[in-house]
């Protein structure tokens, strides 16, 4: 289909362009812009007076405003509002309200529905009056899900006035709940999924009703089975599959060790009523520690007794490991007693004050250090 130039349509689109790029209405009167259009785009283009552009943009604004009012009047979902107030460099107060909602295609939409200069100062009661007026104009009084503002004192006061206004009814108040910021599921935070489920489960009734109300046409509803599954995921994701580094730190605590960790985990999972193979998990941690010991033994060269360093045959690990006779006495220099003795860990090595010093120069992860610091 060939292109047909329409000046009326051109003026409407030019008005949208000027508003979007925050250009002055006089832009349509530019001789250079006229020359560019006539030479490169459309020979029939002529300048557009600023008064014409202003009138046309105002008409477009009121037409779209009416469309939004009609749309919200028939909208059967919930709408969240965000608002802010500020003072311009000319000491003029302004207020802006943005509406957020989910459309029929399950897409998040947002529109600025209120942007005006305030003749009065932006005190709490005045902000509340503006919000109520906005909600009445756009038929949102009985469809509000939440209102978000910053922590300015005037906004806090406005929320108190708003709660006392009989014309405004917030969803959370219908369920006897307080407002809550639900955590997001962030891939870079290990506990974000738990926090999201923890917060959502507490508000399961309101979330279920809100979701089911919006999906009434396709029948994809949230049921109690979904929330039961969420509770299982909440526990299993963090209490059945966690890093053994924490358990190893507890094992290295002379007051806990393997037996104490076994008793602790057994009691813990009994209270949570979660099935978990405690002996297998503790035994796996034991094998990890044994392999760690072997790795250290492979990279650390023992020093001969009587060397200039004055250390044991374990070199710089002298403060850590020592040879002990079966009767529990100190180390021995004889080869026979050395071969039959046991390696024991000096308790003082794992004191927080000594850990960093003793481990300096060894491949001990800083995260492991932090875990030990929590335990001791």
Image (tube, rainbow, N blue to C red):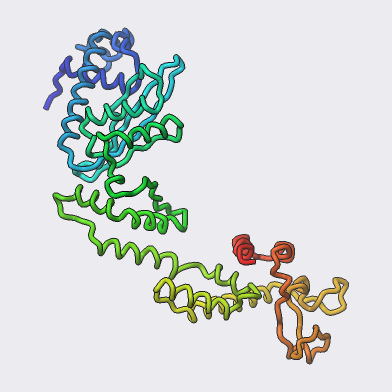
Q: Nearer the viewer, residue 133 or 2?
A: 133
In this figure, what is the number of numbered marks? Answer: 0
Is residue 361 visible to the viewer in this orientation of the structure?
Answer: no
Q: Please report the residue visible at 80 percent of the width from the left and 89 percent of the height from the top.
A: 335
- Residue 95 visible here: yes
Residue 131: which quarter of the image?
top left
**x and y percentages locating residue 332 in the rendered image:** 82, 86
Foreground of the two, 357 or 127: 127
The quadrant of the image that shows the N terminus is top left
Question: x and y percent of residue 358 in the render?
Answer: 73, 66
> Is 376 positioned to the left or the right of 228 in the image?
right
Q: Quadrant of the C terminus?
A: bottom right
Q: What is the x, y in percent for residue 28?
A: 29, 12
Asked whether, in this view, residue 266 is left or right of residue 137, the answer is right
Please report the residue visible at 20 percent of the width from the left and 32 percent of the height from the top.
139
Please give the name of the residue rendered at 36% of the width and 16% of the height, measured from the top-left corner.
Answer: 119
Residue at the far left in the pictured view: 1
| Vertical side of 264 occupied by 179: above or below | above
Quarter residue 191 falls in: bottom left
User: Residue sitting at 33 percent across and 10 percent down?
Assistant: 32
Q: Please, is residue 284 above or below residue 20 in the view?
A: below
Give the camera-side residue of 109 and 210.
Answer: 210
Q: Is residue 272 above or below residue 370?
A: below
């Amino acid at each position: 289909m060939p292109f047909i130039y329409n000046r009326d349509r051109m003026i409407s689109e030019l008005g949208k362009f000027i508003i979007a790029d925050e250009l002055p209405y006089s832009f349509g009167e530019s001789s250079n812009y006229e020359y560019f259009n006539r030479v490169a785009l459309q020979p029939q283009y002529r300048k557009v007076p600023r008064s014409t552009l202003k009138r046309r943009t105002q008409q477009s604004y009121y037409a779209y405003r009416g469309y939004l009012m009609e749309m919200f009047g028939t909208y059967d979902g919930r709408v969240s509002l965000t608002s802010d107030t500020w003072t311009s460099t000319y000491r003029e107060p302004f207020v802006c309200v943005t509406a957020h909602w989910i459309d029929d295609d399950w897409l998040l939409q947002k529109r600025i529905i209120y942007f005006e200069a305030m003749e009065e100062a932006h005190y709490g009661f005045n902000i509340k009056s503006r919000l109520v007026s906005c909600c009445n104009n756009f038929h949102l009084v009985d469809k509000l899900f939440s209102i978000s503002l910053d922590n300015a004192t005037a906004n806090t006061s406005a929320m108190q006035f708003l709660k006392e206004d009989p014309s405004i009814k917030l969803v959370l108040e219908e369920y006897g709940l307080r407002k809550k910021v639900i955590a997001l599921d962030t891939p870079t935070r290990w506990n974000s999924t738990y926090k999201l489920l923890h917060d959502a489960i507490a508000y399961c009734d309101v979330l279920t009703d809100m979701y089911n109300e919006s999906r009434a046409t396709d029948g994809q509803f949230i049921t109690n089975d979904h929330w039961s599954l969420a509770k299982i995921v909440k526990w299993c994701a963090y209490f059945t599959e966690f890093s053994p580094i924490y358990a190893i730190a507890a094992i290295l605590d002379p007051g806990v060790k393997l037996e104490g960790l076994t008793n602790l985990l057994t009691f813990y999972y009994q209270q949570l009523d979660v099935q978990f193979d405690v002996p297998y998990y503790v035994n796996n941690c034991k094998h990890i520690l044994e392999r760690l010991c072997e790795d250290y033994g492979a990279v650390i060269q023992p020093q001969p007794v009587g060397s200039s360093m004055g250390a044991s045959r374990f070199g710089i690990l002298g403060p850590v490991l020592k040879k002990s006779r079966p009767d529990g006495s100190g180390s021995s220099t004889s080869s026979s007693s050395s071969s039959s003795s046991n390696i024991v860990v000096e308790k003082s090595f794992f004191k927080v004050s000594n850990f960093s010093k003793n481990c300096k120069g060894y491949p001990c992860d800083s995260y492991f250090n932090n875990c030990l610091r929590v335990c001791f």
